[in-house]
Image (spheres, rainbow, N blue to C red):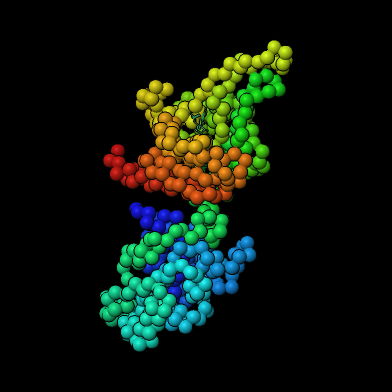
Amino acid sequence: MTDRLAGRLIALGVTGSIAAYKAIELLRLLTADGADVVVMLSPSATRFVGPLSFAALSRHPVETEILDLLPDGRIGHVVIADTADALVVAPATAHWLGSMAAGLAGDVVTATCLATSAPVIAAPAMDGDMWTHPATRANVQRLRSDFGYIVVEPESGPLASGQSGVGRLADLGSIVDAVVEATRDRPVRQPDEAARPPLSTGPIRDSDLVGRHLVVTAGGTREPIDPVRFIGNRSTGRMGVAVAEAALDRGARVTLIVADTDVPLPTDRAHLIRVETTGELRAALLGALFGGDAPPAEARFDALVMAAAVSDFTPAHPAERKIGREAGLTLELQATPDLLAEAGRIAHGLDSGGAETRARVTPRPVLVGFAAETGSLGRAAAKLARKGVDLLVVNDVSEPGSGFGTDTNRVEVLGAAGDRTALPLLSKREVADRLLDRIAEMLDSRDAEAQTAAMHEPPR
Ligand code: CTP
């Protein structure tokens, strides 16, 4: 996988040709090259391919109606025209070439092309005689020389009519190359996802965690100094609660262990455990994951998302009575246990020294940690390894719009294989969904691998 289109929004316009089904693969290729893709279907394209596959793969609602407004009242095709880095029309029919050449904005694909200043790439597909007709030749010529469009010429081969000739949609790789080429030296037009076409909500992701048990921790722990004072931190619990809510919306069973938080909790949907101190969090966590700190043979959970801000220190001798101010105060602090690392060790069958002394928990759960850093994110890879997690979500809390008390977050997701995915500034709910996309995918491939392994097991 390359990322020649990383950070870019590409609008894919599909018109009514038999080759419309190939646009699904084209969408996949553009996405594999890092693009955020939004799809527009002309009315005749919808007779060949439905919007559902495009919506599922692009994660954006598909634009089919020129007059449709977005939920927030913006005009869909104008938002696309204003934010896309390039428009690619593939397959482009003879009818679409004619409408475009004449500037007739009768469908959403043509209207968006008319309204944009982004480069347009058209990949025609049609019958051989239609391609060579003087009308088509003139239209293509006008698109090229008057509009500056890039036309990726069709290829020769068997056509839908049963005949052979020039008219087949060009090789999809060469269409992607043309998009890369057209955008190469241009800055990303609209890096802010909020200004781009909205992402799908609901139906696409709504059931990919059915049957999964997720344990999520959220909020900041409080370590008592005396009955009225504590050591706390700035965490509000928003990120962890967003993960829990998104997971519930996608069908998961969720155990939410919450320390101090100031956001409403999904009390009637999640199994909620309230804790205050790191000690209480440890007991609740190991109980939910393993039924205690003894390793079980079978996992009781599919994924742990450890978003709680766990205090690293706790007063060594909390006072039973309120400490008066007369004598002054010097606190002796002791380090708390690293709960995530401990959960990781138990899940992976390791003892506290890192030796494999017992069986791994099966099926293998997915472990996710969060790391709030200030300034450099350089320590994160070592932290991921130290804690034995599959994913570490790292953010720089000193950056505006990121971290404690904000509704947004800009994070980088590190994978155990050394991969890094930098997400743009997103709402915490969207960060949660992106993370759950990864978790759902990892759980699905875990199960697929287990099934394949079971099929190859020798008969007993
Ligand atoms: N964490 C934990 N137990 C602790 C401290 C942290 O389980 N005692 C978890 C957090 O919930 C988070 C991850 O570990 O998911 C990383 O937290 P962070 O505070 O960044 O890591 P630390 O191990 O405390 O490292 P440092 O303080 O050196 O940055």
Q: Position of residue 420 (x, y in %)?
A: 41, 44
Given the current orientation, which residue lies at the most extreme top position?
A: 327
Given the current orientation, which residue lies at the most extreme bottom position?
A: 134
Residue 447: in sight, yes or no? no
Residue at the image point whose x is 42% and y is 55% from the top: 6
Q: Is residue 18 above or below residue 442?
A: below
Q: Position of residue 68 (x, y in %)?
A: 59, 70
Q: Is residue 450 above or below residue 86?
A: above
Q: Nearer the viewer, residue 166 or 323?
A: 323
Q: Position of residue 36 (x, y in %)?
A: 46, 58
Residue at the image point whose x is 58% and y is 36% from the top: 218
Q: Nearer the viewer, residue 113 or 258?
A: 113
Q: Nearer the viewer, residue 432 or 379?
A: 379
Q: Is residue 302 left or right of residue 427?
A: left
Residue at the image point whose x is 34% and y is 63% from the top: 177
Q: Is residue 132 above or below residue 317?
A: below
Q: Position of residue 146 (x, y in %)?
A: 42, 79
Residue at the image point whose x is 63% and y is 65% from the top: 73
Q: Is residue 233 above or below residue 97?
A: above
Residue 339: in sight, yes or no? yes
Q: Quadrant of residue 357?
A: top left
Please state the total of marks drawn on the protein image: 0
Q: Is residue 252 left or right of residue 178?
A: right
Q: Quadrant of residue 217?
A: top right
Quarter of the figure with the C terminus: top left
Q: Is residue 307 left or right of residue 30?
A: right
Q: Nearer the viewer, residue 211 or 407?
A: 407
